Image: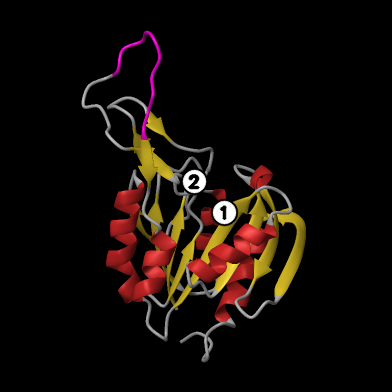
Amino acid sequence: MRILITAGPTREPIDPVRYIGNRSSGKMGAALVEAALKAGHQVTMVLGPVAAAMPAGAKRIDVETAGQMMAAVIAQFPEHDLLIMAAAVADFRPKNAANRKIGRGGTLTIECEATEDIAAAASDIKTPRQRTVGFSLEARGDITRAREKLRRKNLDLIVYNPTDTMNSSTIEAKLLYPDGRSEDFPSGSKADFADILLQRVVALFPVHGA
């Protein structure tokens, strides 16, 4: 298959020096790219500013902001069979970024606006032959929000994982399907989970490997 994978955080500028971001390292995305390449798939990765080393052998597109990631995903997805959204996209960005460094002193109030919902936008343009998979990083036990995202974003599968797995080498995950099925996986390496997730995703296609 032709697989498009997003990974890492985004950085939403406050001024030319500072930004709103998160602690995502890109390790889960790197594991998914490695698993997909090992299985013989063609891979394109859209990466925020990742700290993790990324495997060689995949097409690489580097971005900074949620808007840039959105543009790259929408441009690339029509040429791919599968999109796996492992990136930890910032939910908010400053509404008006300063064009000069903001000086120290007093207090600073930053008005924010929501960033683009990349997974939902990709699902809006997917064809019957394509599949979209998302991740839902939530407080431990908050499965309700993950299920709501699965429905609202029109995903074919979503991975719930608790917030304490961010920037870790391990993941404790639950797979949620649109028909109400779920699978629980105990804490294990992200590399092992990536292999399992790729197997489950391939099974979503009517003809495996198509």
Residues rendered magenta in the picture = 102-111
Residue at 60% x, 77% y is 178
Mark 1 neighbour density, 10 Å: few (under 14) some (14–19) many (20 or more): many
User: Which numbered tag is attached to residue 28?
Assistant: 1
State left or right for residue 204 relative to residue 46. right
Mark 2 neighbour density, 10 Å: few (under 14) some (14–19) many (20 or more): few
Where is mark 2, residue-wise? 53
| Nearer to the camera, 169 or 87 | 87
Q: Quadrant of residue 125?
A: bottom left
Q: Are marks 2 and 1 in contact (CB under 8 Å)?
A: no
Question: Of marks 2 and 1, which one's residue comes earlier in the chain?
Answer: 1
Magenta part, dominant SS: loop
Q: Residue flagged by tag 1: what amino acid is it?
A: Met
Q: What SS does tag 1 mark?
A: helix
Q: Position of residue 69 (x, y in %)?
A: 34, 53
Q: Residue flagged by tag 2: what amino acid is it?
A: Ala
Q: What SS does tag 2 mark?
A: loop
For marks 2 and 1, give the CA distance: 11 Å
Q: Quick one: which residue is furthest to the bottom in this view?
A: 207
Q: Is residue 122 magenta?
A: no
Q: Position of residue 188 (x, y in %)?
A: 74, 55
Q: Quick one: which residue is furthest to the top in this view?
A: 105
Q: Quick one: which residue is furthest to the right in this view?
A: 186
Instruction: Tell me if I can see residue 10 in this picture.
Output: no
Q: Position of residue 105 (x, y in %)?
A: 37, 8
Marks 2, 1: nearer the viewer: 1
Residue at 70% x, 77% y is 181
Q: Quadrant of residue 103?
A: top left
Instruction: Tell me if I can see residue 125 in this picture.
Output: yes
| Nearer to the camera, 143 or 8 | 143
